[in-house]
Amino acid sequence: MDFQHRAGGKTGSGGVASASESNRDRRERLHTKQQSLLFQIDYPEISDNIVPKHRFMSGFEQHVEAPDRRWQYLLFAAEPYETIAFKIPSREVDKSEGKFWTYYNTETKQFFLQFAFKLESNKYSSDHASSTGRSYGPAPPAPPSSLRG
């Protein structure tokens, strides 16, 4: 596929990332060992004046499955579509500069959301568990290798 001449592919425009930009971002994520997820949702029949919305939902807010503190849900909504949800590990999201972003391409009608999970501090977890005498159970499993940067 010819990414160079693709609409929205201009470097820095918020459009399609070049292969070198994607590789640089991937190397940076691997260097910090910070896990991240990227979602691309296509809305081919969305109205021109509608922008998709998203939100995180705790496992205790939903009523489809039994509540489980190891999981949270990421919801996407846009009329006329039904809301969709993805089950993701219940870890704190890193919303610092460059770690959390959304983009809606009005031409292709695609919504992108990428976020990184905060790095876990083993010192805090072990100190906190021993000081309170409580354990919050095992950490959620890592995402499948196909989803890792």
Image (tube, rainbow, N blue to C red):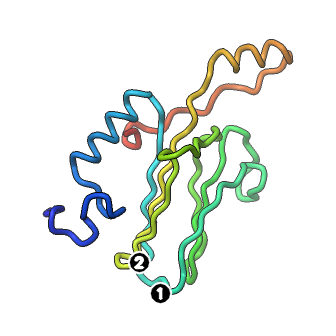
Q: Which residue is mark 1?
A: 48
Vertical side of 8 occupied by 138: above or below: above
Image quarter where the C terminus lies is top left
Rendered image quadrant of residue 117: top right
Query: Is residue 148 toward the left or the right of residue 115 in the image?
Result: left
How many callouts does the rendering have? 2
Pick the front one: 122 or 88: 122
Vertical side of 126 occupied by 68: above or below: below
Q: Position of residue 53 (x, y in %)?
A: 59, 69
Q: Position of residue 61 (x, y in %)?
A: 77, 55
Residue at (47% x, 52% y) in the render? 114
Q: Which mark is residue 24?
A: none
Q: What amino acid type is highlighted by mark number 2?
A: Thr
Pick the front one: 84 or 104: 104
**Label 1 SS:** loop
Residue at (60% x, 41% y) in the render? 89
Residue at (45% x, 56% y) in the render? 39
**Label 2 SS:** loop
Residue at (44% x, 51% y) in the render? 38
Q: Which residue is mark 2?
A: 106
